[in-house]
Amino acid sequence: GDVLGGYNIPGGTFIGINSKAAQLGDVFGADVEAFRPERWLVDDVERVTLMRRDLELVFNYGSTKCLGMTVACMEMNKVVFEVRGR
């Protein structure tokens, strides 16, 4: 077991995550519902690091990590490049 955020979690407890909710954090800005890929093009390294951390939660972690994460991230990088180039 462990204590997370002040809550005692017994050993063997399954902990899940809501992927949609992980993408709605304040770190992404006030307009998280809007399609705005340029939010990733900021000079704030700490903020981008926090956004990447939250995004990785969507793909899971460890042995259950999405096998397509590398491809999805590559596609996202291309989308941002293409949108910015217009």
Image (tube, rainbow, N blue to C red):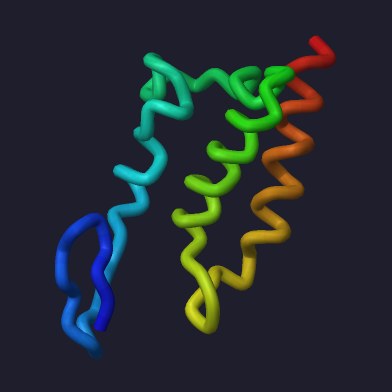
Task: Say which residue appears at 21% left-offset and 82% top-offset.
Answer: 13
| Image position, residue 8 (x, y; %) | 15, 71
Taking 47 as reference, is 73 above or below it?
below
Task: Say which residue appears at 65% left-offset and 18% top-offset.
Answer: 38
Taking 36 as reference, is 55 above or below it?
below
Q: For this rendering, which residue is in front, 14 or 1?
A: 1
Q: Quadrant of residue 12?
A: bottom left
Task: Say which residue appears at 70% left-offset and 29% top-offset.
Answer: 45
Q: Taking 25 as reference, is 70 left or right?
A: right
Task: Say which residue appears at 35% left-offset and 34% top-offset.
Answer: 24
Q: Taking 60 as reference, is 44 left or right?
A: right
| Image position, residue 40 (x, y; %) | 65, 26
Screen quadrant of the C terminus? top right
Q: For this rendering, which residue is in front, 50 or 62?
A: 50
Q: Quadrant of residue 42?
A: top right
Taking 67 as reference, is 4 above or below it?
above
| Image position, residue 64 (x, y; %) | 48, 78
Q: For this rendering, which residue is in front, 15 or 20?
A: 15
Screen quadrant of the N terminus? bottom left
Q: Taking 33 as reference, is 57 left or right?
A: right
Q: Taking 67 as reference, is 82 left or right?
A: right
Q: For this rendering, which residue is in front, 42 or 76?
A: 42
Question: In the orientation shown, which residue stands out farthest toward the bottom?
Answer: 12
- Count of numbered circles in the view: 0
| Image position, residue 51 (x, y; %) | 55, 37
Question: In the orientation shown, which residue stands out farthest toward the right?
Answer: 85
